[in-house]
Amino acid sequence: MKTFALTHIGLTKKDNEDRYLVKDMTDGTLLLAVADGLGGETAGEHAAEITIGMLESIKYSPMGVENMLIDSVKKADSSIINETIKDPALEGMGTTLTAVLLMNGRAYWVHAGDSRFYIFRNNSLSRQTRDQTILQFLLDEGEVTEKGAMSHPARHMIDQCVGCGDCSPDSGSLDIIKGDKILLTTDGLHGCLSDSFIADILNSSTDLEKGANELLDAALKAGGEDNITIVMLQC
């Protein structure tokens, strides 16, 4: 398996509050993650770093892979809240998280917020995670179109995050087959590029690094209004 990751501050932000993880475990298991810090400047960065650090130190347990990932997220949630209790200046900080653990031909994922996990298979892109946002609710109810969602005023309003308290992450798993590409993104990418546009770039580029950089360039040309992070894996 090949991996490639990048992060970019974008064109309007003063800081990059995104963080990512690509960790090759000793048994051949691979852990991928993206996190988008919330709360402004150092607070958002801190929340993302706490969460990525908690994942990085994950230990296998008999509770099952999905439960293990969920437990790690809940521990990060508690840790962030404890940090805000100790330092009120950090109040309101949190982070999105989308993480995928690849083990024995299967991808186990956990997700909170509006970062995303995609599978690109047989020239088709499918989103595995559902944005935990007010906008996603409006889309589900048919009150907003996909095109209208790109500029909707509620597009950055999330209803779940790590550190917001009582975090309830989504999780799941699926079989991975040879030739699949896994794509994790923060909303600096998919917030300004449609899924069909992302699929077109992945269809036109077989090289991970080239494809990731083309996605980044497209997001910057679309305005680059947020931090942009991309983690890709070729199975």
Image: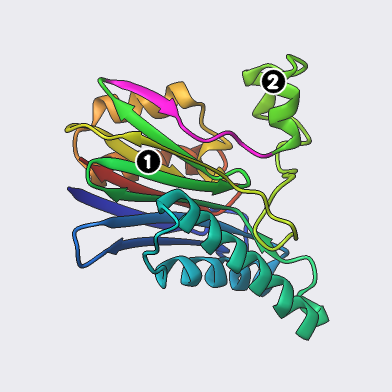
Residue named by callout 2:
140
What is the x, y in percent for residue 4? 27, 52
- Is residue 68 in the magenta section? no
Q: Quadrant of the C terminus?
A: top left
Of residue 9 and residue 139, the one placed in the foreground of this image is 139
Q: Residue at x 78, y 35 (%)?
A: 153
Q: Quadrant of residue 16?
A: bottom right
Q: Nearer the viewer, mark 2 or mark 1?
A: 2
Mark 2 or 1 closer to N-term? Answer: 2
Q: Residue at x 27, y 49 (%)?
A: 103
Q: Residue at x 73, y 28 (%)?
A: 137
Q: Is there any visible trace of residue 224 in the rendered image?
A: no
Q: Amino acid at mark 2?
A: Asp
Residue named by callout 1:
183
What secondary structure is the stretch in magenta mostly built from? loop
In the displayed image of the protein, which residue is found farthest to the bottom?
86
Mark-to-mark CA distance, 2 and 1: 23 Å
**Label of residue 153 in the image:** none
Colouring: rainbow
